[in-house]
Amino acid sequence: MKERGILTVVSGFAGSGKGTLMRELTSRYDNYALSVSATTRNPRPGEEEGREYFFKSVEEFENMIAADAFIEYAQYVNHYYGTPREYVETQLKNGKDVILEIEIQGALQVKKKFPETLLLFVTPPSVEILKKRLVGRGTETMAVIEARLLRAAEEAEGIDSYDYLIINDKIEECVETMHEIIKNEHVRAFRNVDFINNMKEGLRSLSKGV
């Protein structure tokens, strides 16, 4: 029987490099699957159904909510976004370690529904480096950057709810750290209950024959 994959949620500050980290991780190792979200917003140029998002009408999305078809969902700027349960379950059953990139509120929502979920939080080594990275992108005004830093201060209050902290200093080392954490999770005792019970039963049977 194929070993079930692990559901991993990755969160992090804007500018922490979590997107780059996950792209490197999935390109380097073939046992990972990035979850594809559903949304009610229209596709942007170049986006494809099932690659960037599963595009749904509001009615379709709300029917999925009613059917408890999402692991988590939220509404931003008049559009729904959510993680389809069926897609994730299929990947996990196929032995893939599924990675969701979502913010803290959604991460804690997933953890509450699925306590076995692994939560990872990505952060730069310091506040100074975080600000430097945001400014260095050159894609946002200082007002937007200040807003992102304010949001980061709010997010920091929830970091201690995560299982592991990933300090993204050197991307190569960070990718390997994340991979090792997820790999080691597979041998945690609580994830191997069936194996443990089989060993116990086998040993009880042997002891009766001694």
Image (cartoon, grey):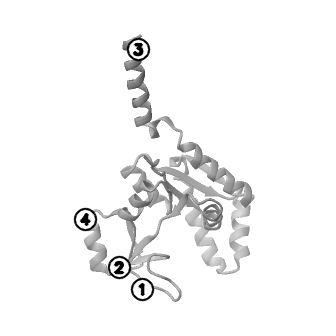
Q: Earlier in the sequence, mark 1 or mark 3?
A: 1
SS category of the residue bearing label 1:
loop
Using the rendered view, name the quadrant where residue 152 is placed: bottom right
Q: Earlier in the sequence, mark 1 or mark 4?
A: 1
Q: Earlier in the sequence, mark 2 or mark 4?
A: 2
Quadrant of the image for the C terminus?
top left
Name the residue carrying label 2: 56
Separation (CA) of disc 2 from disc 3? 58 Å
> Which mark is on residue 82?
none
Separation (CA) of disc 1 from disc 3? 64 Å
Q: Position of residue 69 (x, y in %)?
A: 31, 64
Q: Residues within 10 Å of mark 1 (few under 14, many from 20)?
A: few
Q: Amino acid at mark 2?
A: Lys
SS category of the residue bearing label 3:
helix
Name the residue carrying label 1: 42
| Disc 3 + disc 4, Cβ < 8 Å | no
| Disc 2 + disc 4, Cβ < 8 Å | no
| Disc 1 + disc 3, Cβ < 8 Å | no
Name the residue carrying label 3: 207
Q: Earlier in the sequence, mark 2 or mark 1?
A: 1
Seen in the picture, residue 136 relative to 31 is either above or below; the reply is below
Q: Nearer the viewer, residue 1 or 50?
A: 1
Name the residue carrying label 4: 67
Q: Position of residue 190 (x, y in %)?
A: 45, 37
Seen in the picture, residue 186 relative to 32 is either above or below; the reply is above
At horizontal 45% and vertical 38% (from top left) the residue drawn is: 192
